[in-house]
Image (spheres, helix red, strand yellow):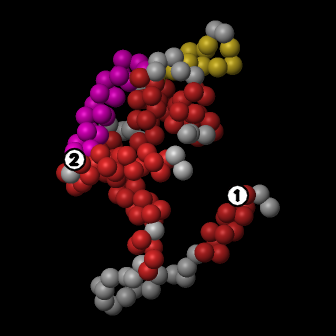
Amino acid sequence: MSARDARNAHVRAMRTPPVVERESSAAVDLGPLSGFIGYRLRRAQLQVLAGFEQALREIGLSPGQLSVLVVISRNPGLTQSDVCTALGIQRANFTPLLHALEATGLATRQVLPADRRSNTLQLTALGRDVLVRALALHERLERRITDCLGGGGRAQLAELLRKLEAL
């Protein structure tokens, strides 16, 4: 059995029965879940991601596309593999993302002369304009997060998250 099959079997086994409507609006006891770091991180991530997606919807970008545009902008000429590695994106998932950026005229690929199997990536003029707009929209979300946490709380959370990334 492959790792994927095992994971899917585990998920199926963990499924709960259908939700039954409750008559009261009493709070649900989450038990130890409320203290699990992973659970809290995931809930916070979902909340922030929803705000991020909503902000970017205005210009038709996904959070993943924005990440790619930022990396290409800061590192013109990177190969597709370099971008995948930098962002932790599997190549199979990156290809459709890049196709979408090309189809909308935001990024281009150019064959690397030294290795014709590799492509370098660049933003188009439109891609640079859209990136500026996307970063301005994202800045509004960052301000909401800072307002929620306070300046010191935001810096502290960023540092703690960096530590967790190193696990």
- 155 left or right, relative to 124: left
Range drawn in magenta: 122-144
Q: Amino acid at mark 1?
A: Arg
Quadrant in which the N terminus appears: bottom right
List x then y, in percent, for residue 31: 44, 80
Q: Nearer the viewer, residue 158 or 117?
A: 158
Residue 136 spot, x, y in % from top left: 25, 34
Task: Kindly identify the residue that appears in the image at 30 percent across and 34 percent down.
Answer: 135
67 drawn magenta: no
User: In screen coordinates, is 2 left or right of 116?
Assistant: right
Q: Which residue is mark 2?
A: 151
Q: Earlier in the sequence, mark 2 or mark 1?
A: 1
Circle 2/circle 1 CB separation < 8 Å: no
Residue in the picture at 61% in, 14% down: 111
Per the image, the residue denoted by label 1 is: 4
Q: Is residue 167 above or below residue 105?
A: below
Image location (x, y in percent) of residue 39: 45, 65
Image quadrant assignment for residue 23: bottom left
Q: Residue at x 46, y 21 (%)?
A: 75
Magenta-span inclusion, residue 139: yes
Instruction: Give the percent coordinates (x, y) of residue 104.
Output: 43, 28
How many residues crowd around disc 2 within 10 Å: few (fewer than 14), some, or many (20 or more)?
Answer: few
